[in-house]
Image (cartoon, rainbow, N blue to C red):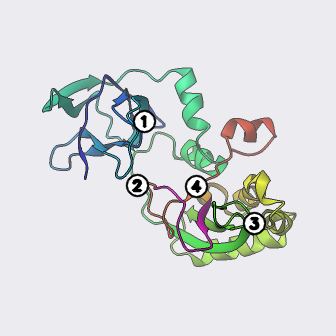
């Protein structure tokens, strides 16, 4: 169950006209989850929440740094609520200019398609009038010995690969056609074939993601919002070994493989 947590530091700035809250503190043990959440009845106000660990806990103090990104209406000051001596305290935080290192660090978290979309969007803070999200399974691969236990050393770990594409189209039909067309071009299918093998999985799906995203950018242009290639993992005895995500996906706890924009630019791509 979540509760209000304590922050040692909190700062605010904008990236691509989105509000970024960044903060740091220390958790008393391992296993805590930390995040910012808007307080809906109160405009431009967020609270810092924590969820304590369940089960076995090691008493190791662990510093943390978190960043939350939210839609912004252009205000110059926000309010962040956190706990001080177990009591809620509201702190006014003035927005400061983003630094070059912060801008590069956030950009490196984004896919080339997301970066291209934000560049095209420019200073417009309004949400688009229409858009669609297309999701489909890509396949799975079993990795022998990857989930071995003391009494079952050869137990395999199953990875399932998923594709999600967002674009400014009225429905998913056009996105589906674009994905199909991309698979008919170049090395997209070959990259996926390699990934879905025990020996190819170790290099990850980045190559497939990059090839598919490049073709979708050519087909959909500035209507392409984002391309996500995610995985879920489970042992073959049916126990999930994934984590958790704040983004709603078709499967619980995907791991995101997003191509750094700086790498895309260095490779001569079209971020």
Residue 132 within the segment the image draws in magenta: no
Q: Earlier in the sequence, mark 1 or mark 3?
A: 1
Q: Nearer the viewer, mark 1 or mark 3?
A: 3
Q: Nearer the viewer, mark 4 or mark 3?
A: 3
Up-down relation of residue 45 to residue 7 (above or below): below
Up-down relation of residue 51 to residue 101 (above or below): below
Up-down relation of residue 94 to residue 152 (above or below): above
Helix or strand or loop: what does disc 4 sit on? strand
Q: Locate residue 20, reporting x and y percent.
A: 40, 35
Residue at figure coordinates x 38%, y 21% from the top left? 96
Dividing the image into 4 quarters, which one contains the C terminus? Answer: top right
Q: Label 1 to label 4, Cα distance in Å?
A: 18 Å
Is 161 on the left or on the right of 58, as rendered?
Answer: right
Q: Nearer the viewer, mark 1 or mark 4?
A: 4
Q: Quadrant of residue 221?
A: bottom right
Q: Which residue is mark 1?
A: 67
Q: Which residue is mark 3?
A: 144
Q: Earlier in the sequence, mark 4 or mark 2?
A: 2
């Amino acid at each position: 169950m979540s509760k209000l947590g304590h922050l040692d530091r909190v700062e605010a700035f904008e990236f691509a006209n989105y509000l970024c809250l960044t903060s740091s503190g220390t958790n008393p043990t391992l296993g805590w989850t930390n995040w910012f959440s808007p307080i809906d009845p109160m405009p431009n106000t967020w609270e810092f929440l924590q969820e304590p660990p369940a089960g076995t806990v090691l008493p190791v103090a662990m510093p943390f740094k978190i960043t939350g990104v939210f839609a912004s209406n252009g205000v110059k000051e926000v309010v962040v609520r956190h706990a001080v001596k177990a009591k809620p305290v509201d702190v006014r935080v003035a927005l400061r200019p983003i630094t070059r290192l912060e801008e590069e660090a956030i950009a490196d978290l984004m896919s080339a398609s997301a970066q291209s979309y934000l560049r095209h969007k420019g200073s417009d803070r309004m949400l688009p009038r229409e858009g669609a999200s297309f999701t489909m399974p890509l396949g799975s691969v079993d990795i022998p010995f990857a989930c071995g236990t003391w009494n079952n050393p050869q137990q395999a770990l199953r990875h399932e690969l998923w594709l999600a594409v967002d674009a400014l189209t009225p429905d998913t039909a056009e996105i589906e056609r674009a994905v199909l067309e991309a698979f008919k071009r170049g090395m997209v299918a070959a990259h996926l074939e390699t990934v879905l093998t025990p020996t190819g999985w170790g290099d990850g799906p980045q190559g497939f993601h990059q090839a598919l995203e490049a073709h979708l950018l050519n087909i959909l242009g500035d209507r392409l919002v984002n391309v996500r290639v995610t995985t879920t993992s489970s042992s073959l005895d049916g126990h999930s070994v994934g984590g958790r995500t704040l983004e709603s996906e078709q499967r619980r706890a995907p791991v995101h493989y997003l191509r750094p924009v700086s790498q895309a630019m260095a490779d001569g791509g079209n971020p």
